[in-house]
Amino acid sequence: MSGRLATATSAVPLLRAADLYHTGIVVPDVEAATARMSEVAGYRWTKPLSRELPIRTADGERVLTLRYAYSLDAPHIELIQEVPGTPWTATAHAAAHHLGYFCDDLPATSKGLEAAGFALEACAVTDGDAPSVFAYHLAPTGERIEIVDRALMPDFPALLQSRT
């Protein structure tokens, strides 16, 4: 199950490979990037979505507007509009920004990732002080993992279809 840290006496991993549902890429312009990926790879996309959330980073808390689109075609790609000065800053010649996993207990999984050496980089904080909605964790070697509360998207394919 997600939310548990694997130990020497436990074979249960913190995250499950089967819960990987997208690869996120930060881009300077979501519309231009979806058009380019449609042209070269035939991807179809949701309409660009926008969500304003209170976000906590190492620099403190502030409200950010995140704009993004998901590919309708698997393997799913999430293109995220750049927000300079945040973890969502586009980097020249860098493609993958994060691997997105569903989890069943976001606060517990977030704590487990921290215990495993993945520092909490940014998270939404809509319910008190604990991470909610999503959290980004960064490994010392650069891998970034996003965990998303599965209850927010229990039927991901249906959600994608509803946003076209």
Image (cartoon, rainbow, N blue to C red):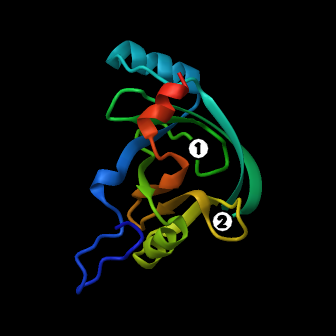
The residue shown at (27%, 73%) is: 12
The residue shown at (45%, 41%) is: 155
> Which one is nearer the viewer's eye here, 101 or 117?
101
Q: Is residue 150 above or below residue 11?
A: above
> Which one is nearer the viewer's eye here, 163 or 129?
163
Rendered location of residue 38, percent (x, y): 41, 17
Q: Quadrant of residue 130?
A: bottom right
The residue shown at (61%, 61%) is: 132
Residue tagged 1: 89
Type of amino acid at the residue the image marks with label 2: Ala
Residue furthest to the right in view is: 62
Rendered location of residue 150, percent (x, y): 48, 53
Whether residue 85 sits left or right of residue 147 in the image: it is right
Does the image show residue 149? no
| Label 1: which secondary element | loop
Rendered location of residue 121, percent (x, y): 56, 62
Whether residue 151 sits left or right of residue 44 in the image: it is right
Rendered location of residue 74, percent (x, y): 33, 32
Residue tagged 2: 58
Classify 10 Å Cα crowding around label 2: few (below 14), some (14-19), many (20 and above): few
The residue shown at (35%, 63%) is: 15
